């Protein structure tokens, strides 16, 4: 995985000079949604915050169900950063990948970030486990 080349090509595609720092990291905002990229040991990590976990114990079951086999997370992983009290989404890319495939994965990742950020912004009283589900960028009833 050459994360540096993929990130550079992403920069060209969105019209900015983009490269990984000496530490192998960079961040990009897609509108209001920040995606952090980290390149380590031949892997490229995509990481995004979804929202505060404080007082959101009601969301755990739904998020765990959504995370099962990546069906409602865009094949990424929903997690909890206990140190910061934030729900997160991340995906690890490895192996050979061309830019079009990377762009497709990144687009799906950003869609999943937006979906779960919006879902977590709903008041707990409005949340149910039988609401619409995220499925590869499409909503299922």
Image: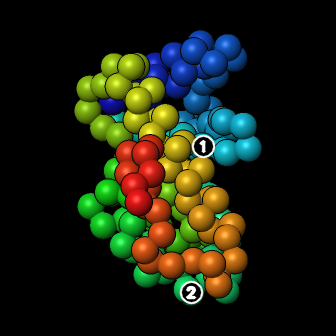
One can see residue 50 in this view: no
- Give residue 98's position: percent from left, percent from top: 33, 19
Quarter of the figure that contains the C terminus: bottom left
Q: Which mark is residue 114?
A: none
Few, some or many residues within 10 Å of mark 2 (<14, 14–19, 20+):
few
- Give residue 122's position: percent from left, percent from top: 67, 70
- Give residue 51's position: percent from left, percent from top: 65, 65
Mark 2, residue position: 57
* Location of residue 110 by image quarter: top right
Q: Is residue 140 left or right of residue 50?
A: left
- Which residue lies at the image location 40% right of the left edge and 35% below the top edge? 105
Disc 1/disc 2 C-alpha distance (Å) = 25 Å
* Location of residue 58 by image quarter: bottom right
Quarter of the figure that contains the N terminus: top left
Toward the front, the furthest residue is 141
* Location of residue 84 by image quarter: bottom right
Please tell me which residue lies in front, 96 or 30.
30
- Give residue 55's position: percent from left, percent from top: 67, 86
Mark 1, residue position: 35
Dot in front, 1 or 2: 2
Please tell me which residue lies in front, 41 or 134.
134
- Which residue lies at the image location 69% right of the left edge and 67% below the top edge? 121
Instruction: Decide: is 121 above or below 109.
Output: below
- Which residue lies at the image location 47% right of the left edge and 35% below the top edge? 106
One can see residue 33 in this view: yes
């Amino acid at each position: 995985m050459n994360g540096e080349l993929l990130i550079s090509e992403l920069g060209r595609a969105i019209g900015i000079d983009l490269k990984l720092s000496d530490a192998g990291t960079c961040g990009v905002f897609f509108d209001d949604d920040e995606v952090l990229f980290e390149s380590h040991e031949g892997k490229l990590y995509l990481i995004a915050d979804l929202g505060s976990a404080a007082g959101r114990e009601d969301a755990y079951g739904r998020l765990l169900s959504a995370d099962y086999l990546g069906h409602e997370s865009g094949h990424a992983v929903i997690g909890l950063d206990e140190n910061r009290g934030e729900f997160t989404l991340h995906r690890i890319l490895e192996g050979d990948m061309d830019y079009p495939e990377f762009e497709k994965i990144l687009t799906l990742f950003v869609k999943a970030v937006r979906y779960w950020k919006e879902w977590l912004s709903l008041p707990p009283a409005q949340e149910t486990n039988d609401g619409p589900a995220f499925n590869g960028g499409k909503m299922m009833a």
